[in-house]
Image (cartoon, helix red, strand yellow):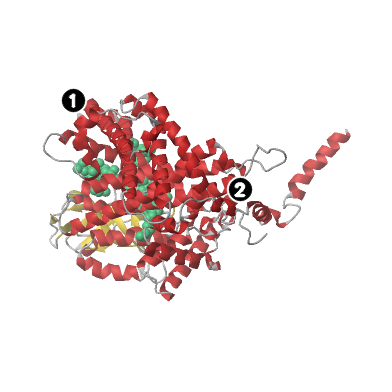
Amino acid sequence: MAGVDYLADERNKAEFDVNEMKIVWAGSRHAFELSDRISRLVASDPAFRKDNRPMLSRKELFKNTLRKTAHAWKRINELRLTEEEANKLRFYVDEPAFADLHWGMFVPAIKGQGTDEQHQKWLPLAYKMQIIGCYAQTELGHGSNVQGLETTATFDPQTDEFIIHSPTLTSSKWWPGGLGKVSTHAVVYARLITDGKDHGVHGFIVQLRSLDDHSPLPGIIVGDIGMKFGNGAYNTMDNGVLRFDHVRIPRNQMLMRVSQVTREGKYKQSNVPRQLVYGTMVYVRQVIVSDASYALSRAVCIATRYSCVRRQFGSQNGGAETQVIDYKTQQNRLFPLLASAYAFRFVSEWLKWLYTDVMQRLQANDFSTLPEAHACTAGLKSLTTSATADGIEECRKLCGGHGYLCSSGLPELFAVYVPACTYEGDNTVLLLQVARFLMKTVSQLGSGKKPVGTISYMEQAEHLMKCRCEVQRAEDWLKPSVILEVFEARATRMSVACAQNLSKFANPEEGFSELLADLVEAAIAHCQLIVVSKFIEKLRQDIPGKGVKQVLGMLCNIYALHILHKNLGDFVSTGCITSKQASLANEQLRSLYSQVRPNAVALVDSFNYTDHFLGSVLGRYDGNVYPNLYEEAWKDPLNDSVVPDGYHEYIRPILKQQLRTARL
Ligand SMILES: CCCCCCCCCC/C=C\CCC/C=C/C(=O)SCCNC(=O)CCNC(=O)[C@H](O)C(C)(C)COP(=O)(O)OP(=O)(O)OC[C@H]1O[C@@H](n2cnc3c(N)ncnc32)[C@H](O)[C@@H]1OP(=O)(O)O
Ligand SMILES: Cc1cc2nc3c(=O)[nH]c(=O)nc-3n(C[C@H](O)[C@H](O)[C@H](O)COP(=O)(O)OP(=O)(O)OC[C@H]3O[C@@H](n4cnc5c(N)ncnc54)[C@H](O)[C@@H]3O)c2cc1C
């Protein structure tokens, strides 16, 4: 029945002001209004339809993405959208496309690594999309090990040019999004060679295709790397392969903010750290943390609404069966994910602030916070994307069999999302960067160098190494100071244990290699502490709206206690808590699930997702799942005819044969 809200009872149970929570989730009233307006704009435009994606062939899918991207660009210009609005529009269109890399990596790479002159030349062209660019770093042979890249950029002083060359098969650029079929230009990372000397990896702007007919320029071989995981999903993106055969570019197309090559071929370094060459990755990792909260919240929204609609067992006297959300097992799987979505949202807001702060400092030649920004973006990218990928799959399972249908939206969400664990740095490799940062910090304790920012808790290392958790009753676990101290103690003890074990090796690098698995765990403990502490910090702010702060407090405690429960081995073995305190934490967790239960649907409504964006029959706002699931099935092309194509060739002969056998 149209217009009936099957989730109305659930919505009536809410104990907080949903409209105020929507503003908290969005970040501000301005962000909420903008998001709300743009998401409706996209949802109401038939050109942005996306429910047919799983049915399309790769070619159809890709052309469809080109059409949508062109339509989005047209609307952005017609409506004179601001950069913020245009980014939101692309977000709600919800289809990975070359434009993500153009705006998300090509433009930031030029901004971050180019000189003022290079900005003046290239940015206006890129802003108007008169050129389209991608970020060509990874090669067939090397992705994680950026210093191992093989592409060369050799300076030719005769002609004042660089010669870009792919000396081996493994030096072929491989993976860059937007490269395969669309980009006219790329920021290419290559080893800079002047006068026979290798100066390591630097960025260069290289034109790949003609601006007249789109054909590859001489010396360039370029194409798509082929079909990826899942139908539809990330196959809207033309991840590409690229080879150079002595391609010449003018000297002024080397991005020269960090280092320069003079007309005479002299290599000079500016007064800035060479790691700024990696700056675009720091920027995107920060964006990816924010994306994690959105992807996880989508899956959680679908699973929560459907868990309220779905009933199994427990009917008494012919009454309704139990809503599956009322099973404690369902709550124990779902509510920590709901809490994680909020936790990741808040930590990503903080990370955005950190990134902006670092950028402002860099402008003033203050590079002191760069290592911490690198560790935080790398670590949180790793933590949040791994948890989100696992969380989406868990949400699929929480929806039982129907979760496996494409119309649930979950298979595609999972397939699109999982590469986030790999791109912008493999998650394990990134955690090892955090571990290096931690080991450096521990080694400097007592040297007079004060740990600052997210690592400042290590200043109390002496106390944290021996403190005892004061929890005696389950309610004691609700105290933020208790949770913080326990997480700080665990992180400190795990890092210090690694450092002590490292010191037993004569060769530190050998020790690091041997202890990789422990180091990764110490890094995770540190990152989880950051997420918990930023959630607690958020709750210290003034948060208006009836019941909003209270319900966020419940989610914060669920996030922390669930992490504690899942990592009991760490907490107990490092002596941070006793097994009795662990069981009290579990008791408190169960009680928190009961408190959150009536608020569950309202908490996912607060994400303010349109049905278009969710793209899920199971997650529909009105909860009217079954008739729509039924209707959706009939739309499958297999149901276009009653007797399937192939019946006469393949089914009938078998049946006839069986008939003959049966007669015998
Ligand atoms: C608002 C607009 C929104 C638009 C949309 C945005 C789109 C974004 C959404 C994303 C969605 C989809 C797009 C996917 C696109 C994917 C793109 C890519 O994958 S691009 C390729 C990414 N590649 C990697 O991430 C490679 C991973 N490897 C590395 O980063 C490094 O090489 C690393 C970290 C492993 C270092 O290795 P190594 O030990 O060899 O390091 P070095 O010797 O080079 O340096 C050591 C030294 O430097 C410090 N360091 C390292 N990295 C950084 C950094 N990034 N910043 C600052 N400092 C860094 C390191 O800590 C060491 O310091 P030290 O003091 O010496 O210990
Ligand atoms: C969908 C997608 C989009 C992408 N888009 C782009 C793009 O636009 N531009 C671009 O340049 N690149 C892009 N990439 C490439 C991406 O950045 C790399 O794939 C990523 O950095 C991982 O590197 P790798 O493939 O070399 O993995 P590898 O490093 O080969 O990893 C393989 C395994 O080895 C392990 N490993 C590697 N090194 C270590 C170590 N030191 N210690 C312990 N374990 C280790 C890893 O944990 C992993 O398990 C994209 C990739 C994907 C999947």
Quick check: is the Cβ at mark 1 less than 8 Å away from ligand 1?
no
Viewed as shown, does residue 582 lie left or right of 523? right
Ligand 2 shown in quarter: top left
User: According to the image, label 1 marks what residue?
Assistant: 506
Viewed as shown, does residue 221 lie left or right of 635? left
The numbered mark at residue 573 is none
Task: Please name which of the two marks, 2 or 1, marks the residue nearer to the observer.
Answer: 2
**Mark 2 or mark 1: whose residue is earlier in sequence:** 2
Which amino acid does the dot numbered 2 rest on?
Answer: Val
- Tell me the quarter of the picture where residue 542 sits: bottom left
**Could you say where residue 51 lies in the image, as x and y percent from the top left?**
57, 58
Determine the residue positioned at 65% across, 52% down. 629
Is 30 in front, or is 88?
A: 30
The N terminus is located in which quarter? bottom right
Viewed as shown, does residue 587 lie left or right of 114? right
Tell me the element at label 1: loop
User: According to the image, label 2 marks what residue?
Assistant: 309
Q: Residues within 10 Å of mark 2 (few under 14, many from 20)?
A: many
Determine the residue positioned at 39% across, 35% down. 475
Q: Residue furthest left?
A: 448
Which amino acid does the dot numbered 1 rest on?
Answer: Ala
- Tell me the quarter of the picture where residue 147 sits: top left
- Cβ atoms at labels 2 and 1 below 8 Å apart: no
Tell me the element at label 2: helix
Determine the residue positioned at 56% across, 40% down. 326
Q: Up-down: is 288 above or below 130?
A: above
Is 396 in front, or is 236?
A: 396
Marker count (numbered): 2
